[in-house]
Amino acid sequence: MMLDYDKIYARKAPDEAERNDLKRISGSLMGKIHSLLSKMRVSAEVELVGSTSKGTNLKGGDIDLFIVFPTTYSRSEIVKTGLRIGHTVLPNGREKYAEHPFVFGYVEGHKIDVVPCFHMNENDDLKSAVDRSPLHTRWVNAHLDDIKRREIVLLKAFMKGIGVYGSEVAKGGFSGYVCEILVIRLGSFLKALEFFAGSEKRLRLKEDQPSPMDDAPMHVTDPVDRKRNAAAAVTSENLARMRILSREFLHEPSEEYFDGFPRKSPPRMPRKTCFRIFTLERPDLLDDIIYPQAEKLRRIIVNESRNEGFHPIDSEVLMGRRINILVELESDTRPAIKVHTGPPAFSPETRRFLDKWNDSPHARGPFIMDDRPVVEVAQASRYNEVLIDNLRDKDIGAHLNGVKASIKIYSMPATKEQRDLMQKYMTRNLTG
């Protein structure tokens, strides 16, 4: 099937009216920031960076404004000045934290970031990660033409459609910058898909000069900082998704890949499993801070469920007003007794084991099993009781430890968020 890629591009790229709006809004904000810098006698420049500045943005694009300071300023000075200017030009803005705080807000429905950074040259030792962004913009613009802009938009739209676009912590996908590097290095949207479809094991975008490798599933050397893997955020799950769906698209192209596949409910069939939904209070912090701790809690719940003999099948997280974690189990009960095994018979430590259990409550024993003394001891048999008790002593993250007492476990969805979580879990497909 032949697709009309020009038509797809026209649907996914901003139209002329939106481009004019972005230009007008960014120009106005840059003018205000420049005036504030002059009034404050601050020798910094304001730059438009990110995909909007390159013409590679999808519809509904953000505006990223960076206030670039000379390295003669201290970090505390640029943060203080950046926050003051950000709150002045975005009166309803909020602060967000990358390596240091910055201000974000909305103007006419477009998200605006006002970020302070230091002026850097390629391969300089950076003072913070955000210092690279103006360098990224300059490098990409130096290697772009209108054809490549079109191809980058198509690649971003494809990745967004299959659920792997976005390098934020909760997504673990491909950044816009990685999409731009892929098209610039490989030549086109379809060449990028062929690159993923034909790859094996760990994926590396080959370049003329070698660069350090890391343990990430995918490595794309950042051309402005060769020590950095620009694709470090990509998870193995999202890389697998991109490989498989690139292969499927090349086999049978369809516009559905650009628009997202509808979630279909699975056939009705008895699962004969048990669901549990853990919920707890969500601290008033940004997703990038809380999500890794929610993921840590999910892993702890799954590991404790497995270690305690409840045989977890799968799990899912949904962040809303509360943190919600679903786990599906083979069973929610286990025997009320367990075998506690002592040292082998040849060990003199058997004396201590027998002394202990002769004077301690237990269900049965001591007796010999194979070549060891054993006793049967009582244990909690219900899942909720076991897990709540186990979680009391676990470190579930700096910000979640303080709300650990709010954890509740539900057997059936009791709120809209919990129903959404169950729906998300039961309708999962190749796109997530």
Image (cartoon, rainbow, N blue to C red):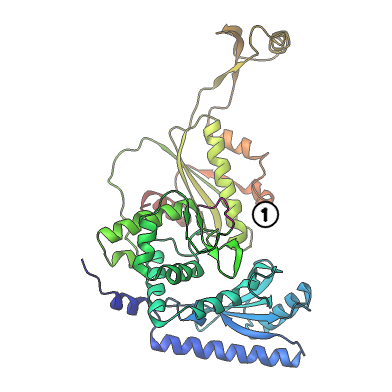
Q: Which residue is mark 1?
A: 399
Q: Position of residue 107 (x, y in %)?
A: 54, 83
Q: Position of residue 387 (x, y in %)?
A: 58, 36
Residue 156 on the magenta segment = no
Q: Position of residue 26 (x, y in %)?
A: 55, 87
Q: Nearer the viewer, residue 300 or 36?
A: 36
Q: Position of residue 198 (x, y in %)?
A: 36, 55
* Residue 142 in view in this figure: yes
Q: Which of the 4 image quadrants contains residue 248?
A: bottom left
157 over 432 or under it: above or below? below
Residue stretch rendered in magenta on the structure:
212-217
Q: Residue at x 54, y 76 (%)?
A: 139
Task: Please state if 425 lies on the left or on the right of 2 as rendered.
Answer: right
Q: Residue at x 59, y 56 (%)?
A: 212
User: As shown in the figure, which amino acid type bears the numbered disc 1?
Assistant: His
Q: Nearer the viewer, residue 60 or 228?
A: 228
Q: Residues within 10 Å of mark 1 (few under 14, many from 20)?
A: some
